[in-house]
Image (tube, rainbow, N blue to C red):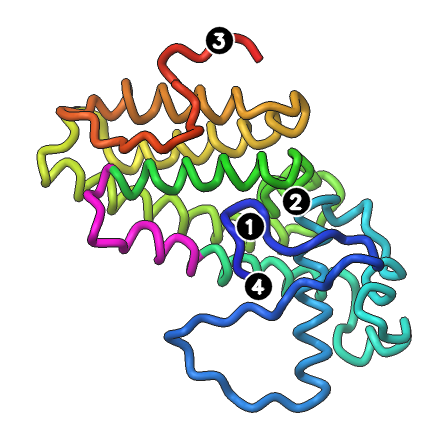
Amino acid sequence: MTRHAHDYGESARTNQRRPEPMTDATEKIKPQRRGDAKRKLLIDIGTAIFTQKGFSSTGLDEIVQAAEVPKGSFYYYFASKEEFAHEVIRNYAAYFARKLDRTLDDTSLSPLCRLQSFARDATHGVQRFEFKRGCLVGNLGQEMASLENEFRVLLLQVLDTWRERFRRCINEAKAAGEIATPLDSAALAQFFWSAWEGAVLCAKLEQSTRALDNVSTLFFEHMLQPVKKPWAKRAGDPDLASAGPR
């Protein structure tokens, strides 16, 4: 289901609408066998539930009930819950890559505006789902003590992709003369994602966008040292510079 970043899928409860299969208009859609569709449905539902609850707190019963398939059928598609989780990570990575494509490749906006647009839309997504949705990568990353090393490798690959997308866009903003920061673009991108993932966690704990707003303010208005402030403030957006305690 195509949602903003950090709010993939619908409610994990079985009496709520299922996550819709994710497709990209640029992709060639291949005919699916019935089994392929069920497998994709399980992965989509797992993505929605893991985004909210994580891996360890999610039981297979909850997943198969939401998908309306017998528990035994789960093992027809996946050898284990761990193998299933690996596919969920890849599914989330593909979804998020398309989200970044739509935002960071939007040439109607300047490079700095693209970065800010991502942060703004992601903040609105967290708020729209009442601070219950997190980031799948952040959720699973917090469970690394109890997960296999392959989880760490997959999650780091996804995170590195996000960092690289931001690094390239920051370089574009430098080349366009939008920002004057002398700091290394790769270091800035790494800092942003470290701060952002922590802010998503704080937003869930505090039931507030304050941490996300603070990261946006510090990163875009101070660390990047914008030559001009291209942020087109929308109606209802918080005044980040003067935001007080919430």
For the C terminus, the quadrant is top right
Residue 239 counted in the magenta span: no
Crowd around label 3: few <14 · some 14–19 · many ≥20 (10 Å): few
Going by the numbered disc 3, the residue's amino acid type is Gly
Q: Which residue is mark 2?
A: 140
Going by the numbered disc 4, the residue's amino acid type is Asn
The picture places residue 219, in percent across and down from the top left corner, at 34, 24
Residue sitting at x 44%, y 29%: 236
Sequence-wise, the earlier of marks 1 and 3 is 1
The picture places residue 9, in percent across and down from the top left corner, at 64, 56
Residue sitting at x 53%, y 60%: 2
Disc 2 + disc 1, Cβ < 8 Å: yes
The picture places residue 4, in percent across and down from the top left corner, at 50, 49
The region drawn magenta spans 97-112
Q: In front of the other: label 4 or label 3?
A: 3
What is the spatial separation of the Cα atoms under label 1 and label 3, in whole angstroms? 35 Å
Crowd around label 1: few <14 · some 14–19 · many ≥20 (10 Å): many
Q: In front of the other: label 2 or label 4?
A: 4
SS assignment at label 2 = helix
Sequence-wise, the earlier of marks 2 and 4 is 4
Q: Which residue is mark 4?
A: 91
Image disc number at residue 244: 3
Q: Is residue 82 left or right of residue 150?
A: right
Q: Which residue is mark 1?
A: 155
Q: Is residue 215 above or below residue 146?
A: above
Q: Is residue 191 left or right of residue 31?
A: left
What is the spatial separation of the Cα atoms under label 2 and label 1, in whole angstroms? 8 Å
Going by the numbered disc 2, the residue's amino acid type is Leu
